[in-house]
Amino acid sequence: MSEPTMRVRFSVNGAAREVTVEARKTLADVIREDLGLTGTHVGCEHGVCGACTVLVDGDPVRSCLMLGVQAGGSDIVTVEGVAGDGVMHPVQQAFWDSHSFQCGFCTPGFVITAYALLRDRTELSEAEVRAELSGNLCRCTGYQSIVNGVLAAADRLQDAGKE
Amino acid sequence: MAQATGAARQVGASVRRAEDPRILTGAGRYVDDIVLPGMLHAAFLRSTYAHARITGVDASAARALPGVVAVYTGDEVRSMTQPIVPGTAVGMHLMPGLKTPTFFALATDKVRFVGDPVALVVAESRYVAEDAIDLIDVEYDPLPPVVDAQQALEGSSAPVFDELGDNVIARYPIAFGDTDAAFAEADRVVGATLAVHRHQMVPMEGRGAIASYDPGPGTLTYYASTQSPHILKLLLGPQLQLAPEQVRVLAGDVGGAFGLKTTVGREDVMLAAASKAVGRPVKWIEDRSEHLSSSGQAREETLDIEAAVTDDGRLLGIRGRLTMDHGAYPGDPFPASAFAGAIVSMMPGPTRLRGLSCDITVVTTNKCSYLAYRGPWASG
């Protein structure tokens, strides 16, 4: 095999990881195949659907549009790293309560996008939530239940902040 | 009989789904999440022409690429699988007025739509399989494409399937009640033309499967993103000359389908044949580009109707002519022609009619195949 490979070190969901991968391999494929974290889904492979969204150094990015080797030295969070100690994050809990998905294929991307959004601020109008989620596509729900889930999570995080 | 009360009451209650926690935490199990020991990866080479004869395929450079295990073309598929005669497994081919062409999982003599599978590469990784696709040379002799139903009905259009003689693949009447009596009773007759454009299903997860043939007992285990595991079991066996009990189909989480994944694709047949030939598991995950060109489409019918009505606003009966653009290959086991009858049957909805009759014409064109999509005409 003549394809050049590179050794990459990064932090993934808080743990130090090291893999040797082809330089041309997307971050999405490195996460799924080399790190074995299959919660990150590939829906369109060209940055449109948002199913592959992960956090790289805190920012939501399309892991299908980034090469794995470009993430060297970064801090990566995938959907598997959102819950803590077996307890769902308020975003995940609110998505469950609000029936925010049907088939669930787009859900990891929505969870990561909402997680990053509500980490920064929880005072949000419905219109703002819709605008913030506009980079993630769902084909089952019609979006209303997803928006409801994010607004419910925002309320819960606000209440938790007041306690 | 005791009334359900309190916690036992389910009607009207908001019930959380049992599968949601694992999906929310990234622990779902969709077909691409499954990794089998020794698993290879497949990619299809697809036609860039809507209608053309294949005059030559040179796959020697692809076969020589390191990491490529096998390349199959139309030459090989004839000996690897049985020809597909859509509908036979469930008797749909016996439908009156229906013509049934015979074809293979890969294009052999000609291609019939942009995206028609022409070759399959099996390699150590999907990346290498796609590299090899680029190395296959196909020579085409283009034919005039049949682009819509009107053109398909013209005698001069080139037949999509030569053996059918023309592009009318089904013609049959459908009738309920006494339509003549309804029109005799009517105060007036009104007409309308209802045309629906072509649609596509486009679930977030495309099609995909892993075929795993075990040469010892001669059994095929097929992991699929499917709505219809039993149909896969029923159809894959005969294609590979296996008895149904030699085929086991496993369906896990499915990332949407909307009807698309009720059909057994030609890709399913080819993938299973490839695993049988190489004796190792082979995974194929459809990418978005091939999904949009090749997975399936639906709708694109024109319905000309006359309605018998009364001056006080009652609808008594309907006479119609339905023309359906079937696309290229009939779906297996449900050819599009069968959905035409369903459209007419469902059209009145809850309206009580004295009679309904419709003449149905279904034509083949050089488009992606018409497959199941939600309820026929029941939603946009």
Image (cartoon, coloured by chain):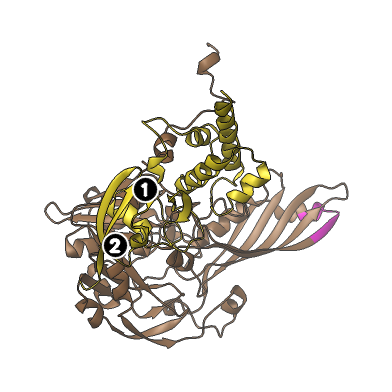
Chain colours: A yellow, B brown
User: Callout 2 environment at 10 Å: few (<14), some (14 to 19), or many (20+)?
Assistant: many
Against B244, is B153 above or below? below
Residue B207, located in which quarter of the rendered image?
Answer: bottom left
Magenta-highlighted residues: B183-190
Locate the N terminus of chain A and report the quarter of the image it occupies. Answer: bottom left
Where residue B86 appears, as percent x and y from the top left, is: 39, 63
* Label 1: element kind: loop
Asked whether B184 falls inside the magenta stretch, the response is yes
Circles 1 and 2 on the same chain = yes
> What amino acid is found at the position of numbered circle 2 in the picture?
Leu
Can residue B83 be seen here? Answer: no
Residue B171, located in which quarter of the rendered image?
Answer: bottom right
Q: Which residue is mark 1?
A: B30
Comparing A156 with B254, the one in front is: A156
| Residue at horizontal 60 percent and vertical 55 percent from the top | B343
- On what subunit does the disc labeled 2 rest? B
- Mark 1 vs mark 2: in front: 1
Asked whether B269 falls inside the magenta stretch, the response is no
Comparing B200 with B67, the one in front is: B67
Locate the C terminus of chain A and report the quarter of the image it occupies. Answer: top right
Where residue B153 appears, as percent x and y from the top left, is: 59, 77
Where residue B7 appears, as percent x and y from the top left, is: 51, 16
* Label 2: element kind: helix
- The answer to whether residue B176 is left or right of residue A60 is right
Q: Which residue is mark 2?
A: B271
In this view, the residue farthest toward the front is A73
Against A128, is B119 above or below? below
Closer to the chain start, of discs 1 and 2, is 1
| Residue at horizontal 20 percent and vertical 70 percent from the top | B67
